[in-house]
Amino acid sequence: MDSERNSLRWMLPVSGVLLAGGAVCLGLLLTGSRFSLPKKPALAAEITSAPLLDRSELAYVPPREKTADPSDFTYDLTIDMDAVRAAAARNHDVAGWIHIPDTPIDYAIMQCDDNDFYVHHNESGAASSAGAIFADFRCDLDSTDNSLLYGHNMGSGSMFHAIKNFKDHDWGMAHRYIEVATLEHRYLYRLLSCNVISGLSGADFEYWTFIDMNRSNIRYFRDSIKSTSETWYADDFKTIGGCDNRLLVLQTCNSGANDGIRCCVFAELVGDATNISQFSEKEGLPGSMFEPIADSPVL
């Protein structure tokens, strides 16, 4: 009996301690759970369910087509070679055609044995104060190093009046390609510069005297274009043609005054575009001079 009482005396305090400890642990757990529970969002009570969207009245929108790379400048070739040959059949003085987008410049290029007749006659050979667009008699549009085309600056906006637009850099950059065709080939030229310079003998830069040139002449010619430039474009392009590139000059009077000052546009040959319908700057032109040509010794 005494031993049983002693056991009970020992067990009761131990049980009390265990019960007290359990109560403390339970309290701590409840307290910790209370602080770890996420709070309800303050706006939860304001959220209401929205009805499903009624799609019955929505129009079908087809997938958007892939757009062209904005960094790729393209030019759509326009001159119809059959039309050029047909014009030449009507008048054997037709040497080719010139086209500049967004301008009236879309004309036959005339050429005869002097630089006077088409100043005063149109492409049909009839007398005309507007004259015609004509190539210098010394040039061969298929082969000479520098081809010169002339046209009046007409107040009506016809002939070469629009080449003065190239004084504006933004306009020129948006129209930086010039299309010129002969009876057999269609060429693409890229803008170099727009210059307002003297067209009279004795000028510092007599650009009209340069037709067929050696490399030394071509270097001088290019340097002179830049030094007399009013609006220079070549530095805007990643690649500049090499020193062997053929060149093009478009000339008109700068104003109505007979002061000898000319507005000239200088361009360099990109290549023969006879067999393509669109030129892409990123893709280039097969067989073109678009990529830089290694420098050569001066001849």
Image (cartoon, rainbow, N blue to C red):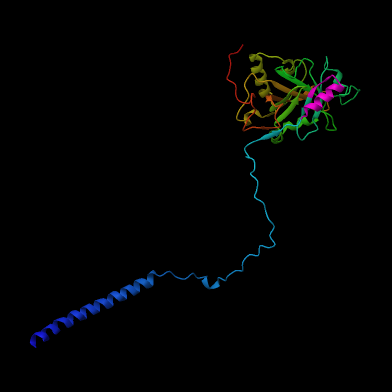
* Residue 23 seen in this snapshot: yes
| Furthest residue in direction left, as rendered | 2
Q: Which residues are magenta?
A: 79-96
- Is 22 on the left or on the right of 120, as rendered? left
Q: Residue at x 84, y 25 (%)?
A: 87
Which of 171/53 is in front? Answer: 53
Most foreground residue, 161 or 42: 42
Which of these two is toward me, 226 or 21? 21
**Quarter residue 8 falls in:** bottom left
Query: Which of the 4 image quarters holds residue 169?
Result: top right
**Residue 112 x, y percent position in the rendering:** 83, 16
Task: Indicate the quadrant where residue 78 lies.
Answer: top right
In percent of width and height, residue 171 lies at 71, 35
Instruction: Specify the farthest residue to the top.
Output: 299
User: Is residue 14 found left or right of 38 in the rendered image?
Assistant: left
Magenta stretch containing residue 85, yes or no? yes
Quadrant, the C terminus: top right
User: Looking at the figure, which quarter contains the N terminus?
Assistant: bottom left
> Does the magenta segment cover residue 230?
no
| Above or below, 299 relative to 80 | above
Q: Please state the total of marks drawn on the protein image.
A: 0
Task: Say above or below: 27 vs 241.
Answer: below
Query: Which one is in front, 248 or 252?
Result: 248
Q: Locate residue 269, reporting x and y percent.
A: 68, 24
Task: Report x, y in % for residue 6.
Answer: 11, 84
Q: Residue furthest right?
A: 127
